[in-house]
């Protein structure tokens, strides 16, 4: 529920350190750290209209406030001094994702993955329009990395069938 309500004070969050996976990911002597949370979209709805018009003052204040809370939480739980070592900060929330991916309400997994909207029951890859195919989280078989790789492969198979 804290996630759905975008309650950054109390929601669970992840700390991702890519340098642990890829050697030399960050410049020497530096680290790139990601603090990640999931959020429901409703909290951002009130900012959406102004955001899309490029008027972002209230939105920026809100997202910076949330980022600061997360940094403080990580600082307290795991990384003392984090807020003082920060040189560059990029903040992205649901509206950012919506802008870059075009996903309605930042639905990163596409439409609800319910039983009656998954696998063969999801929107098909083929369309009634000749040469128009759809491959993405919104289409068969579903969202997430595994889903969209499958979607791409299925789309390729459909195109080859036609050829
Ligand atoms: C923070 C985060 C963490 C996630 N973690 C996981 C995870 O752990 N496991 C998991 O399975 N899934 C995870 N997901 C979900 C997963 O990333 C998505 O379901 C998947 O990437 C969707 O793939 P897609 O091809 O539908 O869309 P996208 O990956 O969004 O790709 C669409 C592409 O189209 C481009 N585009 C948009 N509009 C245009 C245009 N007009 N012209 C040209 N290009 C355009 C976009 O820039 C983008 O590159 C996560 C998502 C997020 C945001």
Image: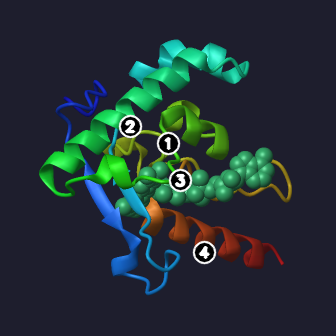
Determine contact: label 1, label 2, CB under 8 Å.
yes
Q: Quadrant of the C terminus?
A: bottom right
Q: Is residue 27 above or below residue 86?
A: below
Query: Which label sits on residue 67?
Result: 2
Q: Secondary structure at mark 2?
A: helix
**Counting residues from the N terminus, which is met first, the one under dot 3 or under dot 4?**
3
Q: Quadrant of the N terminus?
A: top left
Query: Which is in the foreground here, disc 3 or disc 1?
Result: 1
Separation (CA) of disc 3 from disc 4 = 13 Å
What residue would you read off at disc 3? Answer: 137
Q: Nearer the viewer, residue 69 or 145?
A: 69
Residue 160, position as x, y percentages in the image: 75, 79
Q: In terms of image quarters, where does ligand 1 lie?
A: bottom right
Query: Which label sits on residue 91?
Result: 1
Residue behind label 3 places its C-beta within 8 angstroms of ligand 1? yes
Query: Which is in the foreground here, disc 4 or disc 2?
Result: 2
Residue 124 placement, left or right of 158: left
What residue would you read off at disc 4? Answer: 153
């Amino acid at each position: 529920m804290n996630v759905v309500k975008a309650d950054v004070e109390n929601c669970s969050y992840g700390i991702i350190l890519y340098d642990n996976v890829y050697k030399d990911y960050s410049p020497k002597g530096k680290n790139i750290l990601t603090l990640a949370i999931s959020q429901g979209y409703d909290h951002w709805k009130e900012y959406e209209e102004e955001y899309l018009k490029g008027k972002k003052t209230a939105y920026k204040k809100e997202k910076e406030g949330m980022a600061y809370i997360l940094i403080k939480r990580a600082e307290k739980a795991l990384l003392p001094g984090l807020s003082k070592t920060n040189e560059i900060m990029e903040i992205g929330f649901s509206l950012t994702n919506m802008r870059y991916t075009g996903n309605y309400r930042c639905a990163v997994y596409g439409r609800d993955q319910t039983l009656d909207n998954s696998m063969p029951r999801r929107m098909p890859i083929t369309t009634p329009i000749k040469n128009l195919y759809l491959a993405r989280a919104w289409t068969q078989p579903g969202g997430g990395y595994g889903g969209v790789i499958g979607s791409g492969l299925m789309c390729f198979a459909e195109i080859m069938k036609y050829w």
